[in-house]
Amino acid sequence: MDKKMMKALCGTCGIETNCEVIISESSRSDGDYEYPDEVVLLVTKCLGCNKCTVSRVTICDSDMYFDENGKLVCPQTTKIIYPKYYNKNISREKFIESFKTKIEELDSCCPSEILLILRECLYAYEFRLNTLSTVGLRMIVDSVCQEKEKSGEIPKAKRDDLLEKGYINKEQKAILEKIVDYGNDAAHKFNPLKNNDIEICFDVIEILLKNIYHLPKIKNKLPESKRNKR
């Protein structure tokens, strides 16, 4: 029997690939609908990664239309049932794209060398290099301290001096200490953070950079209050 082939979404690769159809079972949705949905349960095997995907494809006849070339188009939605981590990967990709935008917003206020490390750190996370990403987060904390020492704003490149000069508060310092510890564990004990924890640390770093570099610039642009003019 010839193998049936089709283009289908691979849950491992995350894109449409050439797949072998293992199982294809279709049914119509219940209910008195003029255009009932067709639901197809698919089990496919990717010819690239050789992994199987279980998906549910829904086709709604009422959404069908003819394109400019007169070809009938049937819009469909695909939900990946297996592998289970597929939806987590989608969430992860959305975080990465969102954080790239946040980095661009920081570009006008943060030193370029710090943003370079942040971009490389996110790049490592994008390619699932969690050890490098975790170590990179620690490097960002260190680079902020070094930049402030270099500019003469703190006497030494230490987190205690950031606290003393009012760039961070005690709670923020405690969080930064944790990020430094995570980086040390990744570098020396090969114990990187998991995806969700890395994303939390990225958010913390963004807040840190905004507090230290962005807020002072906003403060300088604000008009003086009437009380200060007296």
Image (cartoon, rainbow, N blue to C red):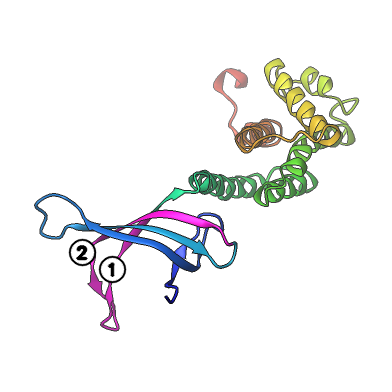
Residue 220 occupies quadrant: top right
- Using the image as rendered, state which of residue 88 and residue 219 is in the foreground: 88
Separation (CA) of disc 2 from disc 1: 7 Å
Residue 181 occupies quadrant: top right
Residue farthest to the bottom, as pictured: 69
- Using the image as rendered, state which of residue 134 and residue 40 is in the foreground: 40
Q: Quadrant of the C terminus?
A: top right
Query: Residue 61 bears which disc, if any?
Result: 2
Residue 167 visible in the snapshot: no
In the image, residue 177 above or below residue 85? above
Q: Which residues are magenta?
A: 50-78
Residue 12 occupies quadrant: bottom right
Query: Residue 74 bears which disc, if any?
Result: 1
Measuring from the top left, give residue 132's x and y in whole percent. Answer: 77, 43
Q: Secondary structure at mark 1?
A: loop
Amino acid type, callout 2: Asp
